[in-house]
Image: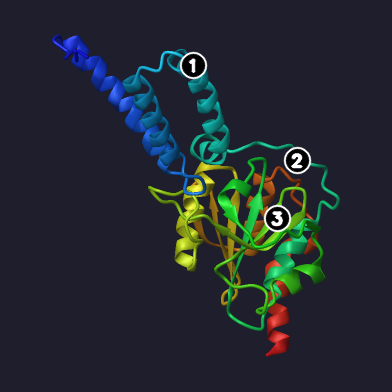
Amino acid sequence: MTICYPSLWQDWVELGILFLFIHTIQRWLASDTRIPLLWYSYSYSVVILAIYYANLTTLIPCIPIITPSLLMLALLLHKKSLQKDIIPYTKHINNVYDPSWLELVLRSSVSIINDSRTVVLLFEYTDELAPFITIPYILESRVQPELIKILLHPLLYTSESMLWITASGTIISNKAQWCILSEHTDESPIASTTSTLKNLSLVYTFKTNGLVCFIDQNNRTASLIVHGTQMKTVSIHQAYTIIAKHLHMQVSSTPISKALYEKSNTTQHHTT
């Protein structure tokens, strides 16, 4: 068998582009640790070389037919990683059953005065956040003050997790944590510290229209992360207004929303 070597610079350019394309595909396949697609690709390449080397004339015409089908199968198996790398899924917001659910969430959060924990709230708008989050279980329950207090109890909640709520006022989980970004994997171990949680919130809110609210129990203020930007030390009422506008909710003008911060301080004073 005669081996032809490239003699023109155009041949070297074509080979370089081909090798770059193959290298990019291989790195993309290697980023998925759930399924060993990279080793499947290597195995299929070895099979193709063996078929050509053995000069199996019956199988050689089948290779151009089978390869596109296998490529589509790899795309289907790799679709979760592909979705994360390109664009999040946008969903329709259902009708809100109670327009005051946001006030209920903030009021219940600031009323927890038994310790000095930080309560982290994750608000999902139209972009689907499920591909970016790890949760041990799903609740899918409507916002209720008593339920929020139970979910934020020290035995059920830590400051390294987020209370995940959709724009329709549905609680998804109180154990939501971002997936840590990595060069080689898209689902590494989950975030374990508050600082890591803030850093990942900056990344994922830049990719999506989600919003993260950190409520400080010591001074009854909030920090918001939205569009990849952090707003530090805002009042509870300011946080309520910003979140409501971001979720395209009607901002309430009732005394309840205006007195969230003052009411929480009054409650704390009576308990001391």
- Amino acid at dot 1: Cys
Crowd rating for badge 2 (residues with CA inside 10 Å; few <14, some 14–19, many 20+): some
Q: Secondary structure at mark 2?
A: loop
Q: From the image, which quarter does the N terminus lie in?
A: top left
Q: Position of residue 56 (x, y in %)?
A: 40, 18
Task: Point out the residue furthest to the right here.
Answer: 97
Q: Earlier in the sequence, mark 3 or mark 1?
A: 1
Q: Which mark is residue 93?
A: 2
Residue with the mark numbered 3: 165
Residue with the mark numbered 1: 62
Is 65 situated above or below 152?
above
Residue in front for this viewpoint, 181 or 143: 181
Q: Which mark is residue 223?
A: none
Q: Residue at x 62, y 82 (%)?
A: 115
Q: Secondary structure at mark 1?
A: helix
- Amino acid at dot 3: Ile
Q: Position of residue 34 (x, y in %)?
A: 51, 48
Residue in front for this viewpoint, 172 or 40: 40
Q: Earlier in the sequence, mark 3 or mark 2?
A: 2
Query: Dots 3 and 2: beta carbons under 8 Å?
Result: no
Q: Earlier in the sequence, mark 1 or mark 2?
A: 1
